[in-house]
Amino acid sequence: MSEPASVNCAVDCLEGCVLGDRCPGRPFQEDAERFIRETPLDQMLEMAAEAVRRRQLERLSGNGGPQWVFPEDGIRPDDF
């Protein structure tokens, strides 16, 4: 079996996960399955509609771009 660091999931796992229980995405898959199993469809649709509404409001307000946070003492070129 392959090592998790050497597996490209987008390519190697098209037919199913090749790592089985060692898959680094396993906890996320379990969380997603639990969410789908326990959350009513109506609630999911409400969540999606709210997310769309928020994005539309951000675009209309002009604040939809990236939010930049700069350190108080500025950015020095030698920091890169």
Image (tube, grey):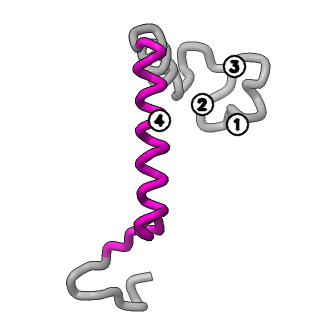
Q: Amino acid at mark 2?
A: Pro
Q: Residues within 10 Å of mark 1 (few under 14, many from 20)?
A: few
Q: Residues within 10 Å of mark 3 (few under 14, many from 20)?
A: some
Which part of the image, by quadrant, shows the C terminus?
bottom left
Mark before the other along the chain sequence, 4 or 1: 1
Q: CA distance from mark 3 to mark 1?
A: 10 Å
Q: Which mark is residue 8?
A: 1
Reading the image, the residue beneath label 3 is: 18
Q: CA distance from mark 4 to mark 3?
A: 36 Å
Dot in front, 4 or 3: 4
Q: Is residue 4 above or below residue 34?
A: below
Say what secondary structure mark 3 lies in.
Answer: loop
Say what secondary structure mark 1 lies in.
Answer: loop
Q: Amino acid at mark 4?
A: Ala
Q: CA distance from mark 4 to mark 2?
A: 37 Å
Which residue is painted at 68% across and 32% down in the image?
9
Reading the image, the residue beneath label 2 is: 4
Which residue is painted at 48% across and 15% down in the image?
41
Q: Amino acid at mark 3?
A: Val
Dot in front, 2 or 1: 1
Reading the image, the residue beneath label 4 is: 49
User: Picture coordinates of residue 23 (x, y %)?
Assistant: 56, 23
Dot in front, 4 or 2: 4
Mark before the other along the chain sequence, 4 or 3: 3
User: Picture coordinates of residue 63 (x, y %)?
Assistant: 41, 68
User: Which residue range is magenta in the image?
Assistant: 40-69
Q: Is residue 54 above or below residue 70?
A: above
Mark before the other along the chain sequence, 3 or 2: 2
Q: CA distance from mark 4 to mark 1?
A: 33 Å
Mark before the other along the chain sequence, 4 or 2: 2
Q: CA distance from mark 2 to mark 1?
A: 9 Å
